[in-house]
């Protein structure tokens, strides 16, 4: 069975590598280091899921998501955020994401957390 | 059309006429006044004499010759009322051995009595003549009283004018905005600072409903009806209201963050409206925003490297980097645990900041007391094993609770983990629940095992 594709978007290289290692057993992991790159990869590869960091220099997560939607892709998005305590966190549903994962995430349960959001 | 100044001219003219009349009448009646005043003097004298007599009695009772002598000399210089002279005689009679001094006093008193009697007779004769002119004297007094009254009114009118202008100067130089509304919420007065802050001139704003004009929008941007406005409620409840976080909408349509205090306005025992005082808190809000942003940024900046550190240790521990020797595994676990502790510390700092800013919110949900205890003990099992302490549970009460589960668990975890950290090896820590008056009590007895 062909593995599903997940696009991992984060401006921090180490986080991308750690997350990639967490997920590579279950998914084909694509990575992007900025919003612009994410849009390009998403349009080219049509991933099954996008893990999108909310706060990135240049283009932030919600704006990136908006552009991806405008490009005609309805790929489900899960936000990653290090700002777990701010009120914007509760707004992720309003932004159209299917879930939110707080940083630092538990590397051993990351894959399960993602699957739970996708099944919900 | 009558001149605007005519009332003043009229009043001044009447005062002058009255004063002239008084001068003439006063001159004619001067002698009668003198006599009346003379007769009043007797009353004063009589009182003084009475006082000295009392002191004299006391001095005699105490055999204080020096004081008695001095008082006697005083009495000699005074004119004495016959009744008091008689009292003096009675006092004298009570004394066992009358001294020559007291005899002298009595003589003086008797002389005084004669004098007074003669004066009284003269007064009685004069009374008949006086009563005729007394009526005119009363009239003069009445006029005099009116003049004084007029003067007082005139003076206080000037005073209240001065007080008014002082009050106006005070209100207009205040940095805080002040406005007054009547019992319908209509603006009756607004000071200069409020005009500047709200962007309306006094002429534009007075006569308008203040709620509809500047207070119709809540801080969250929603419409605020006058019925639910706490500022307007002051008029109904007569209770003062204040808030440190509100907004007014300026003439330009901008939001003005304000601190507001409204006090009911009571005049002559009746509620006539309210006085609202407010302060522009734009700067304070900006400082709060920056502080909040600072904490948020610091938290974000710390979490990003921690995500990699925790992730890396977690993956190593989970075997992603290949098999590890027991020593290496121990070191990796240590790194993972400490990175988790750092995350908790950052969360604590953010919590404290939230509590300080008054923005800490509880996320209430239903659970039961036993569930809270079991969850706490489960999460601390490893710690207890490491510390070689027997951690057990004793549930005697398991009522349903509505609590913020995460926060209560946090409190219990802190307490139990402290108990584990600071108890000696081989002791027993029991986490339990018991019924308490009005609720449930969480217990944490620690026992040293033999």
Image (spheres, coloured by chain):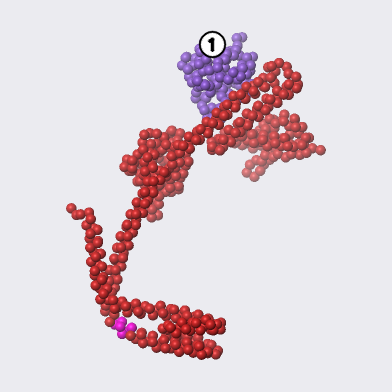
Magenta span: B123-128
Write down the residue under mark 1: A45
What residue is drawn where x is 36% and y is 54%? B163
- Residue reaching furthest left? B1
Magenta-span inclusion, residue B386: no
Is residue B139 among the parts visible in the rendering? no
What residue is drawn where x is 54% and y is 38%? B358
Q: Quadrant of the C terminus of chain B?
A: top right
Is residue B198 among the parts visible in the rendering? yes
From this view, report whether residue A4 is shown above or below residue B117.
Answer: above
In the rendered structure, the answer to whether residue A79 lies left or right of residue B240 reads right
Q: Position of residue A69 (x, y in %)?
A: 48, 17
**Is A38 in front, or is B53?**
B53
What residue is drawn where x is 67% and y is 39%? B442
Give the red chain's letter.
Answer: B
From this view, report whether residue B93 is shown above or below residue B380.
Answer: below
In the rendered structure, the answer to whether residue B376 lies left or right of residue A49 reads right
Q: Position of residue A16 (x, y in %)?
A: 59, 18
Give the purple chain's letter.
Answer: A
Q: Main secondary structure of the magenta part?
A: helix
Identify the secondary structure beneath mark 1.
Answer: helix
Magenta-span inclusion, residue B125: yes
Q: Position of residue B420 (x, y in %)?
A: 72, 35
């Amino acid at each position: 069975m062909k593995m599903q594709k997940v696009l991992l978007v984060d401006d921090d290289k180490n986080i991308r590598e750690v997350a990639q290692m967490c997920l590579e057993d279950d998914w084909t992991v694509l990575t992007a280091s900025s919003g612009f790159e994410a849009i390009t990869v998403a349009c080219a590869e049509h991933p099954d899921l996008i893990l999108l960091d909310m706060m990135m220099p240049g283009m932030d997560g919600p704006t990136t998501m908006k552009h991806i939607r405008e490009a005609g892709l309805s790929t489900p998005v899960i936000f990653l955020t290090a700002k777990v305590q701010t009120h914007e966190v509760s707004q992720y549903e309003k932004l159209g994401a299917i879930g939110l994962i707080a940083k630092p995430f538990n590397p051993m349960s990351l894959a399960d957390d993602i699957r739970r959001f996708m099944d919900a | 059309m009558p001149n605007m100044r005519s009332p003043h001219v009229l009043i001044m003219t009447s005062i002058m006429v009255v004063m002239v009349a008084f001068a003439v009448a006063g001159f004619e009646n001067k002698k009668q006044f003198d006599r009346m005043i003379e007769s009043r003097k007797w009353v004063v004298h009589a009182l003084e004499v009475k006082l000295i007599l009392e002191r004299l009695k006391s001095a005699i009772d105490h055999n204080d010759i020096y004081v008695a002598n001095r008082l006697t000399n005083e009495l000699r210089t005074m004119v004495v009322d016959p009744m008091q002279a008689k009292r003096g005689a009675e006092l004298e009679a009570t004394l066992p051995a009358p001294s020559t001094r007291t005899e002298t006093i009595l003589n003086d008193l008797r002389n005084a009595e004669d004098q007074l009697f003669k004066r009284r007779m003269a007064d009685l004769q004069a009374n008949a003549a006086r009563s005729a002119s007394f009526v005119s004297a009363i009239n003069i007094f009445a006029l005099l009283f009116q003049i004084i009254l007029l003067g007082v009114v005139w003076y206080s009118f000037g005073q209240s004018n001065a007080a008014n202008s002082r009050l106006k100067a005070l209100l207009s130089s205040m940095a805080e905005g002040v406005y007054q509304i009547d019992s319908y919420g209509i603006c009756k007065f607004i000071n200069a600072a409020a005009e500047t802050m709200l962007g309306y001139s006094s002429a534009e704003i007075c006569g308008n409903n203040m709620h509809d004009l500047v207070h119709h929008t809540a801080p969250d941007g929603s419409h605020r009806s006058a019925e639910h406005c706490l500022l307007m409620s002051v008029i109904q409840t007569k209770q003062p209201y204040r808030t440190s976080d509100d907004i007014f909408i300026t003439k330009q349509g901008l939001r003005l963050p304000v601190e507001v205090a409204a006090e009911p306005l009571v005049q002559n025992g009746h509620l006539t409206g309210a006085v609202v005082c407010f302060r522009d808190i734009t700067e304070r809000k900006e400082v709060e925003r920056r502080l909040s942003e600072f904490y948020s940024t610091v938290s974000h900046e710390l979490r990003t490297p921690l995500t990699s550190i925790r992730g890396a240790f977690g993956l190593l521990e989970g075997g992603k980097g290949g098999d590890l020797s027991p020593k290496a595994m121990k070191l990796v676990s240590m790194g993972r645990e400490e990175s988790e502790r750092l995350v908790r510390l950052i969360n604590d700092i953010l919590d404290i900041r939230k509590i300080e800013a008054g923005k800490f919110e509880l996320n209430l949900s239903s659970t039961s007391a036993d569930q809270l205890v079991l969850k706490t003990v489960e999460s601390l099992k490893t710690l207890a094993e490491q510390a070689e302490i027997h951690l057990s549970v004793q549930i005697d009460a398991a009522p349903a609770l509505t609590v913020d589960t995460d926060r209560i668990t946090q409190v219990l975890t802190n307490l139990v983990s402290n108990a584990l950290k600071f108890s000696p090896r081989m002791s027993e820590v029991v986490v339990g629940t018991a019924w308490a008056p009005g609720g449930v009590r969480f217990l944490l007895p620690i026992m040293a095992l033999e």
